[in-house]
Structures are given as structure tokens and as C-alpha cells.
Amino acid sequence: MIHAARMGHMGGSLSSVDILVSLYFHSMRCGPANWGDPARDHFIMSKGHSVEGFYAVLARAGFFPESALADYGKFGGMLYGHPTLKVPGVEIPSGSLGHGLAVGVGMALAAKRDGLPSRVFVLMGDGEQAEGSVWEAARAAAHYGLDNLVAIVDANGLQISGPVAKVMNSGPLAAKYASFGWAVREADGHDHAALTAAFDSAPWKPGAPNFLLAHTKKGRGVSFMENDASWHHRTPTDDEYGRALAELGARQGSGAAEAWAAGEGGAR
Amino acid sequence: MNAGKASCRHAFSAALLEAARKDPSIYAVCSDSKGSTALGDFEAALPRQYVEAGIAEQDAVGIAAGLARCDKTAFVCGPASFYSARSLEQVKVDVAYAASDVKVIGISGGVSYGYLGSTHHALHDLAVMRTFPGLEVFLPCDAASTAAITAYLAGSGKPAYMRLGRGPVPEVYAPELKAEFAPGRANLLREGRDCAIVAAGEAVQPALAAAAILAVRGIQARVLDCWSIKPFDVAAIEAAAEETGCIVTVEEHSVHGGLGSAVAEAVAQSRPVPMRIIGFPDEWAPAGSSEELFAYYGLTAERIAAAAEELAARAKGR
Ligand SMILES: Cc1ncc(C[n+]2csc(CCOP(=O)(O)OP(=O)(O)O)c2C)c(N)n1
Ligand SMILES: [Mg+2]
């Protein structure tokens, strides 16, 4: 998608896609079949720029045909560079960082007040934590005891202009969320088994919202993209594209992709 | 007319409570603003439908959008100054772009807060809100119109911004008028063919009083209440231009981007006529109560009448 459209956010898509796979193919009760069910689970992509992995997962989950992915970045098409409501499976538009957690609070609150079993998953970036609005929502989630809310931070350590710790350090995130009244866990954000174990056991503490610090690698899976801030929104040359595919293909050969498709997760 | 005075915010909260008693999916969201929005009764009567966000307007709008995603109709209520600036991006993205069933209720709009100064004035809200596709923008002028528009909002299913004033205001719509409030339809308050005075919100009352003054001087002014800033009644404005030959607009808003601009956009492209835009100029208002500021900037019956008289003479002389 990114190579063809000559635009996109490679690094953050690769760092978050394992989290999405764990959610959509294992932990969440949320798919095209139960989309109209108010008791289903919800997902909010607060780091809306990581849209390519999100679109791929939504397509694989059956929200729209995979052939539609070719539409990405085409004039008048369905797939913009940030999620919109035109895309089946997208719950709320995003792209301006710092909005998703508050919307998640509203959804989790609605589920509580309606007595529904819905859980709300919100994926944010670690750079995104610099937005003050995130912390307004973090406080409200604890105030209302929203243990049906799971906030995940894709802790890849990088934002656009460099390491989060250097640009504007928002850490220590686990301690900060804990001090805001959240139940906190950490996991390897590329380990499907660890991720699904965390998601499936929520709420971790009755009456407390759940915060998962997912340790990830930006650009995960492509050696020359990993942990390199410039791949935040760089587009690969033909040569880089070929090498990236070769590396990812090698990993697919290991069976991971087949496991994803089979909806099992945790294959590595 | 002008029988009693009542505040729009109290009319709003009473109408909202009435609607919410019938419809449990109607929620109110406040940001330490239940006093200024007069929603204390709402919280006491329907605590399950009330959400307090604390002093956090961005969070309040986001929460309202989340509630709306889960089949609620959420009224997020607080000072217009803050909701149209601090949380403007949430209104743009989470409400308007997301087509959420959220009503942003800006209380104490314009210069309602008077001496509190420009941090608390909202003289830019119509300008910004009316550029968001899909967001309806309403500006009622009295208690009756506020109640009617609130009832509409409770069932519209669409995102909207409504600005309300703070203090008690004279009645414009007496019950016997049986006025209707259809979005996109301006209300004709007085017929006239010598000039048109187009107003909204708390400027409607002085506009009507100006027309009465003009009548004594032999000038028949048409008065339109453009409470529906968006959708906007372009046809009524074009008809006013055609039939009266000149238009004075009056608003408690910056002269940039508000009602005057909407009228100018309409007539300039079809029936250009001389216009005068009365509102707040491009400067920070001096210390003053809302009455003092209305007088200072010419939003009074006498000054509106004088402007209309001069404009009508100019239009005739052309
Ligand atoms: C409010 C806002 N400010 C700035 C941006 C531009 N922007 C897009 S992505 C990004 C960096 C995000 O870093 P992080 O949250 O760590 O995301 P990730 O590393 O997962 O890509 C920035 C600054 C934005 N989208 N929204
Ligand atoms: Mg990051």
C-alpha cells in the first residue's frame, strides 16, 4: 500500500500490527457479523496515522474485500491516509492525536450505564502521550471506574523527530497510569500469546481501567526499518520494497502469516 | 411582545429535562458547568443520564462523542468561549467529522460574561462552527425559541452547535404567534419593503425595536430572525435583497465570519445590494457589561435604526 501510494506511516503500522492481529483475530468480539450488536466490543485507533496495518487487518477480518486495499491513497477512494467512517469497521475518525481515549471513556461509560458486557480497546502511541487531552481522559476513566476499558500504548520509543525520551519524555508511563488509578501491565507487543493473555484476563482489577504498556519495535520485521525514526513516514524505494518483502516473506515462511490467517495468533 | 423576561439557558435546561425524561438515551455532559448551564435539576432528576467531566472541555466533547457512538444523544454543555476554542478540534473531528449525535451547547455566548473579559467572550464561535461540514449552528433569541430548538435537537440525530445567552431576555416569540422553528428557515418577524434588518440571537430584540422607530419615520423595515445560522435561509435573504434593496445585519459576534458574512456570501453572489454589518469590530472589547458593550458597539435600537435609515436612503439614491 505504502509503496504503491508513495505515502504512509510505515514504522508505526509495523509496530502496532501484532496488537491489532491479537485483538481482531483473538480477543475482541468485534467483526462484520456482530457489528450491529450493541453488546459487542469496540476498538478505537487513536494513533490514526498507523492506518495501513489497520486497513489490512480490517480487510482480513472481512469488513471489506482485500482487493479494496488497492484503493489506498487514490483520489476519491475509500481509504484515506487516516481512518474515516467511510471504512467499514472504523468506529470513529482519527488522525489528530490525543482524541481516542476520551471517546473510549464515553463508550465504556455508555456500556456500563446500559449494563452491557462491551469492552473498549484504545490504541495510542507513546509520542501521543504528550497530548494533555490524553491525561484528562485517563483521569476520567479512573474516576468512573471503567474496568471495561483497555488502553494500549504502542511503546516503540520513537516519534517523528526522534526518541520519545528525547523529544518530550512522557514516562514512566506505567507508573503514571498507575498513579492515575489504572491497573497496569506490560507485555512484549509482538508476542501474540502475551498480548491475548493480557486482553483476555481484563479487567485485571475490578473498578480500575486497564493500561497495557506494549513494548514494540518501530518498523518491526524489516531489519533496516527497525528502530529508525526516519521510517515514521518514509516510503520505500523499489529496492527497499523488494528487500522488505523478502524479509517479511521469510517470516511468513515461518508460519506466522498462516497462523494469523487461521485466526489463532501466538504462533511464534 | 416583551411581556416577560426569561433566560435562554433556563429554557434550555427545562426543555432538555423534559425530553430526557421521555428518552433515556438523552445524556447531558458538563465540565464543572452544571450551574452556568442550569443543569443541576437534570443531574438530580436523571443521574444515570448525567456525566460530569470536570474542568476538561476536550475530554467532555470526546466523552460525548463516545456516548453518541453507543446510541446516545449527548448534550455537552458549558461556556461557549471554551467549547468553541479549547475543545474546537474535538468538535471538528469527534462531533462534526464523525457525524456524532452530539449537541454542543455554548452557554453565555457573545459578551454575556461582560466584565469577565475576552477570555470569557465568544465572538468567534459562529465563524468557526459554520465552516464544519455537517454541523448545524443555531442561535435562538429568547426562551420560547430556545425551548423549541432544544426539542428539535433532542430528536434530530445530527451534530449541532447552539449558542445561548446568559441573562434574562425579553420575549420575542409570544406563544400566540405559534412560531415554527424549521432548520434552514429564517423567521419573518416584521414585513417591510424599504430595507431589511437581519438579526440573530440577542440582537433580534433591538432589531425589532429599530424597525418600530423606523416606522415612525415612515420607513418600513423587514425584520428577519436568522436563528438558523446553518443551514442558512439563502432564499429569504435573496428575497429580502430583491424586495427591499438593502440589508443591515446585526449580531453579537465579530463582524468577520458570522451572520453578516453569511448574508454577504448569499447576496454578493446573486443579488448584490448595499449592506451594513453591525457587530463587534476587530478589537478586544473594553471592560463592560453586555448592555454597555451593545451600546458601545451600536447594537441598540436607535443606532440600528440610524444605520438602516442611512443605508435605505443610499440604496434609493442609486
Ligand atoms: C495533534 C497532532 N499533532 C501532530 C500530529 C502529527 N504526527 C503524526 S504521527 C506523529 C508522531 C506520533 O508518535 P507516536 O505517538 O509515538 O506514534 P508511533 O511511534 O506509534 O507512530 C505526529 C507528531 C498529529 N497527527 N496530531
Ligand atoms: Mg512511538
Image (cartoon, coloured by chain):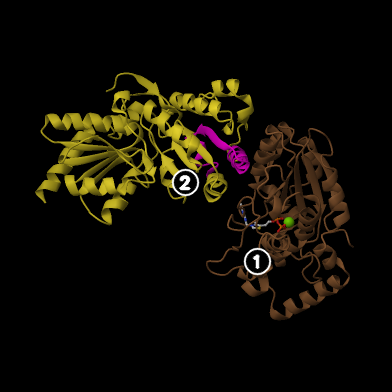
Chain colours: A brown, B yellow
Dot 2 falls on which chain?
B
Mark 2 residue type: Leu
- Of B103 and B282, which appears nearest the observer? B103
Real-space Cα separation, disc 1 to disc 2, in angstroms = 30 Å
Residue at 82%, 74% in the rendered image: A249
Q: Tell me the element at label 1.
A: loop
Number of numbered discs: 2
Query: Does A119 sit left or right of B27 as displayed?
Result: right
Is residue B105 at least partly visible in the picture? Answer: no
The percent coordinates of residue A98 (x first, y second) are 65, 48
Which of these two is toward me, B120 or A110? A110
Q: Is residue A229 above or below residue A129?
A: below
- Tell me, yes or no, whether the highlighted magenta stretch contains residue A128: no
How crowded pointer 2 is (Cα within 10 Å; few <14, some 14-19, many 20+) is rated as many
Camera-nearest residue between A29 and A52: A29
Q: Would you name the residue on which mark 2 appears?
A: B135
Identify the element where label 2 is drawn: loop
The residue shown at (44%, 35%) is B152
Q: Residue at x 34, y 34 (%)?
A: B180
Instruction: Provide the residue designation for mark 1.
Output: A8
Vertical arrangement, residue B52 with respect to residue A102, above or below: above
Mark 1 closeness class: few <14, some 14–19, many ≥20 residues within 10 Å = many
**Given the current orientation, which residue lies at the most extreme front position?**
A33
The range drawn in magenta is: B59-88
Point out residue A149 in the picture as x, y percentages from the top left corner. 74, 41
**Location of residue A66 by image quarter:** bottom right
Viewport quadrant of the C terminus of chain A: bottom right
The answer to which image quadrant residue A217 occupies is bottom right
Which quarter of the rendering shows the N terminus of chain A? bottom right
Mark 2 close to ligand 1, CB under 8 Å: no
Residue B211 is situated, as x and y percent measured from the top left of the image, at 20, 32
